[in-house]
Amino acid sequence: MPTIPVDGRRRREVAVLVGVRTGRAPRWAAEDSLEELARLAEAAGASPRVTILQERPAPDARTLIGAGKVEELRNLCREGVDLVIVDEDLSGSQQRNLERELGCKVLDRAGLILDIFAQRAMTREGKLQVELAQLQYLLPRLTRQWSHLERLGGGIGTRGPGETQLESDRRRLRTRMARIRRDLGKVRRHRGLLRRPRRKIPIPTVALVGYTNAGKSSLLNALTRAGVHVADELFSTLDPTLRKVHLPSGRATLLSDTVGFIRKLPPQLVQAFRATLEEVQEADALVHVIDASHPRAGEQRAVVERVLEELGVVGKPVLAVHNKVDRLPEAAAAALAREEGAVAVSALTGRGLDDLRKALDALLKATAIGRPGSRPPVLAEERRQG
């Protein structure tokens, strides 16, 4: 997303953020989502200048936001704005209509998140997953850029208008998507081979899950000295990391750090990142890391639970970990520590980490996961199916 001027130095694109509140949706939810969109825009390399919340009885079919708001945005775009980011999913026609009328680039929330993922993916697997998600996003947005015919008739069965450029482009995209899916299938099989040695040893796997920027990577570093990259930004870590940690009873477990979740997560990403999210699906237990300092921690917790349900991850033992309690008043932190089935910690200061180890040890013991001589039920089922 960052552009490069003539002198070669990078500059941040100036962006206008647009939210839409329709019907009886609570205003605070739209405002909170816009605040999150601003952080996403900054993470992608943009510089948000203006935030606009449009309230309508129903979305406008042509532009989503209506003619009046389009005129307001058109004036802003004339004043040096490079990009308009809409905090909703736009249809292909809505995006085209807005770009045509505003005279500048328009991006929706899904496209913005895909751009961030494209910047952050480091491994070959991650890059393949992002490319697949981008192609799935692009396919329904292809439009006819010209009206000439790509191929005219030339023999029996080929006479007639032939294949248009649009159809040709769609075919190329589908061919590339099929190739990426085959490559990701190879990655999945490779992951299965890597899991085989683990199946022979009763070491349970625990996946760290949570809303993006909840502190999963910080917690993994605090528990295992993994050295995972940590930054106070959304989606700072995409690629999964697996590290061993020893618990107070002497048992060992493998902790897996995974990509964070977010509200309005593009379905293309959920589908494309299934190979990475297998670490969550195959885990014997989950540690749900919650940013206790966030004003909407409850809503973020519910978002994660919904995504886990979409992934088919239900029925696993879950330990809730309220992170960043160092930012809370002592009374509030103590109240979270008393919550049943939860632990209050600070990955930054180390507070509560011993309690977390003990709670995780008790969880694995209570569910008979990793007991010497036993097989974790999820892995045993995987063996029968494989």
Image: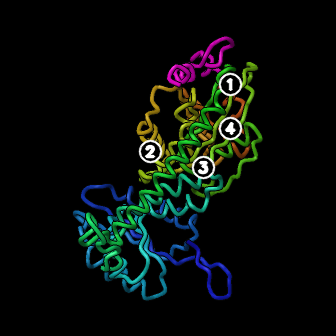
Picture layout, residue 123 above or below residue 207:
below
N-term-proximal mark, 3 vs 4: 3
Q: How crowded is mark 4: few (under 14 residues within 10 Å), some or many (20 or more)?
A: some
Alpha-carbon distance for marks 3 and 2? 26 Å
| Residue at the spot of label 3 | 125
Q: In which quarter of the image is residue 290?
A: top right
Alpha-carbon distance for marks 3 and 1? 35 Å
| Disc 2 element | helix
What's under tag 1, amino acid-wise?
Answer: Lys
| Disc 4 element | strand
User: Which of the pair 200/50 is nearer the observer?
Assistant: 200
User: Which of the pair 382/254 is nearer the observer?
Assistant: 382
| Residue at the spot of label 4 | 242
Picture layout, residue 73 above or below residue 119:
below
Q: Residue furthest top?
A: 373
What's under tag 4, amino acid-wise?
Answer: Leu
Picture layout, residue 253 above or below residue 133:
above
Which residue is rendered at x = 30% and y = 74% of the image?
A: 152
Which residue is rendered at x = 57% and y = 26% of the image?
A: 284
Picture layout, residue 225 above or below residue 264:
above
| Residue at the spot of label 1 | 358
Q: Does the magenta stretch include residue 172?
A: no
N-term-proximal mark, 1 vs 2: 2
Left or right? Give the position of 312 relative to 280. left
| Residue at the spot of label 2 | 303
Q: Which of marks 2 and 4 is in front?
A: 4
N-term-proximal mark, 3 vs 2: 3
- Looking at the rendering, the stretch of residues picked out in magenta corresponds to 361-386
